[in-house]
Image (cartoon, helix red, strand yellow):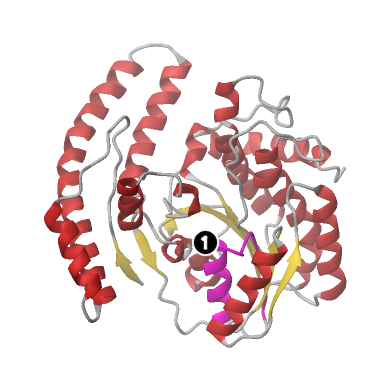
Amino acid sequence: MVVNQVVFFHFPGSTDMDMPPSLLHSIQNQMQSKGGYEAAYGVKIRVKGAVFKILSDAKADLVHRQVNFKRDFESGESTLASSFTDLWTNATSYFFSILSYYDTDEADIRLDGKVAIVTGSNTGIGFETAKELAKRGARVILACRDEAKAILACNNIRNETGNSDVFYKPLDLASFKSVHAFSNDILANEPKLNILINNAGTGKLDNSLTEDNLPIEMQVNYFSPFLLTNLLLPLLKKSTPSRIINISSVMHYFGTVDLKAINKPARNWFQHSRVYSNSKLCNILFTKELSCRLEESGITTNCLHPGAVSSDIFRNQNAINRFLIRMLFKSSWQGAQTTLYLALSPEVACITGKYFSDCKESKTSKLAQDLHLARKLWETTEHIVRLK
């Protein structure tokens, strides 16, 4: 396994950084010359190295401040203060290493005869994941909401990999009706299912409700993947060994679970700002409880944090920020590496119920380790999605 590590940290409230004229001139010259893309990539690596040095020095000072901050807060009795310092301690480490990535060097692993479903796979991490699985010979089903984009993605994957066994099936995670229709189609027409990757998600910053009268972020990110997974379990059990992979996020550190209000719209801005984090915490708790229920079934289930990935979500940033994001954030291919590691690697064939980042097991928040809460969440969710 090859490792390529980069570190990036954004100081809250910081203003735009001016790009050194010499750097800009160098990049422009490199891009205009023969072999410009390869040369520009070299410039990119040098920029990352320089940023790494600057931020390594900054990190030493931040760690010192962090220790004092944690000590001062923990001298009090406030639960909120304790939670905040725990978040600060763990999240700071995550954000400093958020751009580390591992190139999954599993070149000899083939998936001929295997069937994989990747939700939200017409762009970004999902697309790169689906393409890599197709490259290794799997039959890949792109489960997506946007038909035009999904068909285009299928054609691109077929052309790039030479694998014609790549198909699109409609799935709108904002609709339980769509989830049932998709699952019924799969169960009726697919003889096996070896890999299920619940990749799709949304960070929609509004308080809109779905046709099922649920907050859209909670339904797309958690309720529907829960329902989809449970509906497909019979086929996964029939196809063992099988793997289920759920996409979570480091943002779960900000999350909470209120079982009495988990299906209710946020009442104020503060509550709404945490819905995404709550959904990602639920993904981890779901993974842990599912692993307990599937013990000795031949199915493993794990979840992961993909890292900070450059995507269309940043398209409205100013030119300097977009440049820095392209330079320093992970590409979609890099962001897909931990997902691919969990889908392919023999190293995790018998590991289940764990949370990964950068292709290695990682620490979660204390709340995400609460197995009693995980069980209660499962029971509550069963009723919400009408499995019971």
Residue 83, position in %: x, y?
45, 24
Where disc 1 sits, the SS reads: helix
Q: Residue at x 33, y 48 (%)?
A: 319
Q: Position of residue 178 (x, y in %)?
A: 82, 54
Stretch in magenta: 114-136
Give the residue at the far left of this rendering: 22
Which residue position holds label 1? 125
**Which image quadrant for residue 141?**
bottom right
Whether 338 is among the magenta residues is: no
Give percent across and percent down for residue 318.
36, 44
The N terminus lies in quadrant: bottom left
For badge 1, the amino acid type reads Ile
Q: Residue at (45%, 66%) from the top-left corner?
A: 333
Q: Quadrant of the C terminus?
A: top right
Residue at 47% across / 69% down in the picture? 347
Left or right? Give the position of 107 relative to 275.
left
Q: Position of residue 128 (x, y in %)?
A: 52, 68
